[in-house]
Image (spheres, rainbow, N blue to C red):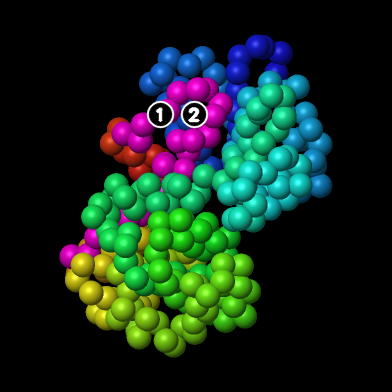
Amino acid sequence: MGTSQKAACVIGWPIKHSRSPLIHKYWMRQHGIDADYRREAVEPEKLGDFIAHLSSNGYVGANVTLPHKEAVLQLADPDSRALSVGAANTLFFRSGRLCATNTDVEGFVANLDVEASGWDSELETAVVLGAGGGARAVIYGLIERKVERIVLVNRTIEKAAKLASVFGDRVQPTAWSDLPRAMRSARLLVNTTSLGMTGQPPLEIDLAPLASDAAVSDIVYSPLETPLLAAAKARGLKTADGLGMLLYQAVRGFSLWFGVKPEVTAELRALVERDLVN
Ligand code: ATR
């Protein structure tokens, strides 16, 4: 690197499509911070070595994405949230120690509060579709917000049962065929599956059983408006999209690295939207 300029990076394999550089460089410009943000393609076997040299390579911190979010827990000091979610997406230094945290949880909830403002966090039942890493962060966020019951619907019911067991009785593994019934009592539906993502089959569900004051959220952000969100909007439901979650999850990393809490502005959102459609 050879300069004393501060830098952060996003570590993944592959890493080409990460929008994190766009987000963090926007905030650096906004706050007059002379720093860089790079994409680092690091294959799994080299992750330990890369992390060990993070500081000596000039990095004040990093984002971590697929497939490293779980492995990184062994390579840094995870906080309780990273441990609870079982994955970390943000690395930062405190007193010379490399710490790992997870900001997906707050990204999901903060975006829901903004985009689907008025969603009823006192609600009794939420339906979560999918049982992968995304679902785990979403469920954790919903439990923090005191949602009483989470119906966890997944194609592979064993995976839903395994994830539900991490959280106890509040999370109920449920078969896809029971989705219409589960939706009748739900005030929030969240898609965490890859269905609806560009290149994947659409998520085809009939939203009719949902109450008219329910909210629908999708963690998929490519395309910006998934068929699920389009259907929810057509029914007049509140919606929150995956791009919002991506933007809000980035806030704490930037604060930890540069000591300034950045804002998710309409201008930033438009910038990333333009990049996603090009
Ligand atoms: P992530 O960690 O990003 O959440 P993941 O672990 O690959 O991703 O999980 C993807 C989720 O999408 C899973 O819940 C998966 O269901 P299975 O557990 O049954 O595999 C779900 N998914 C992917 N393709 C699907 C499809 N065609 N139909 C239904 N669910 C699907």
The residue where tag 1 is placed is 262
* Count of number-bearing discs: 2
Q: Which mark is residue 207?
A: none
Of the image marks 2 and 1, the number of the one nearer the N terminus? 2
Q: Amino acid at mark 2?
A: Ser
**Residue visible at 26% across and 67% down in the picture:** 214
In the rendered image, residue 269, in percent from the top left (x then y), is placed at 34, 39
> Compared with residue 152, is residue 95 higher up or lower down, i.e. above or below?
above
Q: Is residue 217 left or right of residue 195?
A: left
Q: Nearer the viewer, residue 124 or 259?
A: 124
Residue 264 lies within the magenta run: yes
Say what amino acid the circle numbered 1 marks: Pro
Question: What's the CA distance linking mark 2 and mark 1?
Answer: 7 Å
Magenta highlight range: 236-265
Q: Is residue 62 left or right of residue 214?
A: right
Viewed as shown, does residue 186 lie left or right of 195? left
Rendered location of residue 248, percent (x, y): 41, 42
Instruction: For mark 1, give the secondary structure.
Output: loop
Q: In the image, residue 141 lies at what x, y percent?
A: 46, 56
Determine whether the beta carbon of the residue marked 2 sits less than 8 angstroms from the nearest atom of ligand 1.
Answer: no
Work out whether 154 lies above or below 233.
Answer: below
Residue corresponding to mark 2: 255
Residue contact between numbered discs 2 and 1, judged by CB atoms under 8 Å: yes
**Is 20 rendered above or below residue 170?**
above
